[in-house]
Image (cartoon, rainbow, N blue to C red):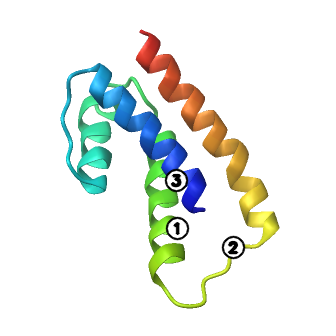
Amino acid sequence: MNRMYYGCYYAVSALLLSSNIEAYTHAGVRQMLGLQFVRSGKLSVKMSKFYSDLFANRQEGDYADFVYYDLETVSELYPQAEAFVEEIAKLIDL
């Protein structure tokens, strides 16, 4: 979960940097993604929700006790993370 989240986080960070948008925290990166790309319609609400859910899963996995993500859960989320990064890459290339 951690690695999937960070793959998406670094993609979003690159998008923000390529657009000269500064964010200093994980929450700030999520907020700027919403304000600058979801509100304008450049990124779907569905993609934004996936990113927020992945952040919550990463937080829980990293900081809560005895959290386990089974292979089925990870196998379902991994292609979505790949699609998210691809979508962000398209926005960077605009």
Q: Position of residue 63 (x, y in %)?
A: 45, 80
Label 3: element kind:
helix
- Quick check: marks 1 and 2 in contact, CB under 8 Å? yes
Q: Most extreme residue toward the bottom, as rendered?
A: 65
Tag 3: amino acid = Tyr
- Please state if 78 lies on the left or on the right of 26 as rendered: right
Q: What element carries label 1?
A: helix
Query: Do we see residue 45 in this rendering?
Result: no
Residue highlighted by disc 1: 57
According to the image, label 3 marks what residue? 5
Of the numbered discs 3 and 2, the one sitting upstream in the chain is 3
Q: For the C terminus, which image quadrant?
A: top left
Q: Mark 2 points at which residue?
A: 69
Label 1 or label 3, whichever comes before in sequence order: 3
Numbered label attached to residue 40: none
Q: Earlier in the sequence, mark 1 or mark 2?
A: 1
The quarter of the picture where residue 38 lies is: top left
Structural crowding at the residue carrying mark 3, measured as other residues with C-alpha within 10 Å and reported as few (<14), some (14–19) or many (≥20): many
